[in-house]
Image (cartoon, rainbow, N blue to C red):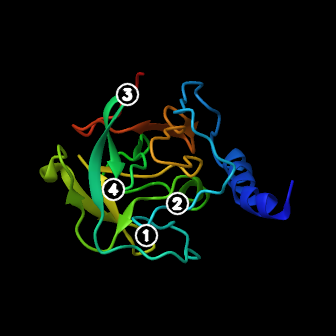
Amino acid sequence: MTKSKLFLAAPIAVAVLIAGCGGSSSSGGSGSSSGSSSGSAYAPPAASTSASKTATTSTPATATVTIAHSKFGDILVDSHGRTLYLFEADKSSSSTCYGACASLWPPFTVTGTPKAGPNVKASLLGTTKRTDGTTEVTYAGHPLYYYAPDAAAGDFTGQGLNQFGAAWYVVSSNGTAVTSG
């Protein structure tokens, strides 16, 4: 393995190792992939930052939530086509995913007001303050997250995983978890 590939693969290996140490991190066996896989490390799109205080990417003033057609039906994605997830441990609009959890499941954050793309119900979009002071986008009261191993638009490898004490699901256009597919 070349030094550059090793350098890019190391952060994923660390995230997987951390995930294995934090809470219940066994897969429910129903995770799916769009078939696209890359050996490169996850870099959150411009529309999000890690909850980590060491994050160096900036949070944009606006973030757009849009709809993508997938094998799960119409699901929420960001303006770059990256899949957005909800965490079943979040029982209100407040996030419960911090530390190692937020490293593997980065929150979808914004500094301004999120925007609704075509077929997204603007009335269901909202925000919640995280403990680090950042603002996370919510939909139908659910904080939204990325899954770090999703390497490209259209990936949904986090679907149905049980990590950090609860399941993670893609979000339907009406704001509910898509638990089948």
What is the x, y in percent for residue 2?
85, 59
**Mark 2 or 4, which is nearer the eye?**
4
Instruction: Name the residue that disc number 4 marks.
Output: 79
Q: What is the distance, in whole Å, between disc 1 and disc 2 at their CAs?
A: 9 Å
* Disc number for residue 72: 3
Residue plotted at (78% across, 58% down): 5
Whichever of callouts 3 and 1 sits on the residue coming sooner in the sequence is 3
Q: In the rendered view, would you say 65 is above or below 164?
A: below
Give the residue at mark 1.
131
Q: Secondary structure at mark 1?
A: loop
Q: Are marks 3 and 4 in contact (CB under 8 Å)?
A: no
Disc 2 marks a residue whose amino acid type is Tyr
The reply to whether callout 2 and callout 4 are in contact (CB within 8 Å) is no
Q: Position of residue 19 (x, y in %)?
A: 66, 48
Q: Answer with mark 2 or mark 3, whichever residue precedes in sequence.
A: 3
Question: Which of the two labelled residues, at mark 2 and mark 4, occupies the earlier sequence position?
Answer: 4
Q: Residue 1 at what x, y percent from top left?
A: 87, 53
Frontmost residue, 175 versus 98 = 175
Q: Is disc 4 surrounded by few (<14), some (14 to 19) or many (20+) residues within 10 Å?
A: many
Q: Are marks 3 and 1 in contact (CB under 8 Å)?
A: no
| Mark 1 in CB contact with mark 2 (< 8 angstroms) | yes
Q: Would residue 34 appear left or right of 88 to someone viewing this image?
A: right
For marks 3 and 1, give the one nearer the viewer: 3
As measured in the structure, the alpha-carbon distance from the residue carrying label 4 to the one carrying label 1 is 25 Å
Position of the C terminus by quadrant: top left
> Which tag, 4 or 1, sits closer to the chain's start?
4
Q: Secondary structure at mark 3?
A: loop
Check disc 2 and report the residue beneath it: 98
